[in-house]
Image (cartoon, grey):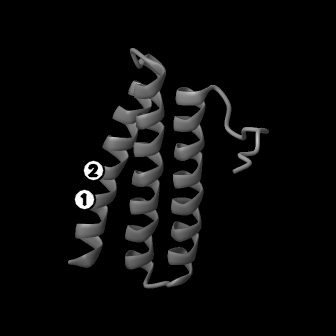
């Protein structure tokens, strides 16, 4: 039963990744492409968790956590670049 459920979930996640990949390639704007890349990363984390459940191995959970953290940081960096034009600002704020 768990094998069938995991296979169905992986199929749905794969479909979502493919559709998001289309949005990355044909996105009307750069923010749409950034959101699609973030969606792909979230779906990859979900797929890793499903594989972890399917194989009954907790090792994959650590991999999923690292990927989620890196995905969050890259999304924040991309958003800052789109808003400000730079990721790391060299100016210091002296009070």
Percent from the top left, x then y, of residue 70? 60, 56
Above-or-below relation of 21 to 27: below
Percent from the top left, x then y, of residue 94? 74, 48
Q: Which residue is mark 1?
A: 8
> Tag 2, which secondary structure?
helix
Q: Pointer 1 and pointer 2: residues touching (CB < 8 Å)?
A: yes
Percent from the top left, x then y, of residue 82? 54, 27
| Residue toward you, 42 or 1 | 42
Above-or-below relation of 5 to 8: below
User: Is residue 72 rendered to the left or right of residue 16?
Assistant: right
Q: Is label 1 or label 2 in front? A: 2
Percent from the top left, x then y, of residue 61? 50, 76
| Residue toward you, 8 or 79 | 79
Picture disc at residue 28: none
Above-or-below relation of 6 to 94: below
Q: Which residue is mark 2?
A: 12
At x 42% / y 53%, what residue is drawn? 42
Give residue 18's quadrant in the image: top left
- Report how far apart the C-alphas of labels 1 and 2 lie in the structure: 6 Å
Give the residue at the far front of this rendering.
95
At x 49% / y 84%, what residue is drawn? 57
Above-or-below relation of 30 to 78: above
| Residue toward you, 84 or 52 | 84
At x 38% / y 76%, what residue is drawn? 54
> Tag 1, which secondary structure?
helix
Work out which quarter of the rendered image holds the N terminus and state it.
bottom left
């Amino acid at each position: 039963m768990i094998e069938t459920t995991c296979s169905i979930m992986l199929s749905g996640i794969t479909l979502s990744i493919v559709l998001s990949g289309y949005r990355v390639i044909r996105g009307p704007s750069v923010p749409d492409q950034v959101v699609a890349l973030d969606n792909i990363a979230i779906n990859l984390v979900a797929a890793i968790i499903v594989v972890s459940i399917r194989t009954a191995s907790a090792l994959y959970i650590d991999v999923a956590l690292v990927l989620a953290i890196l995905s969050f940081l890259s999304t924040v960096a991309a958003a800052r670049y789109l808003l400000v034009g730079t990721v790391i600002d060299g100016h210091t704020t002296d009070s």
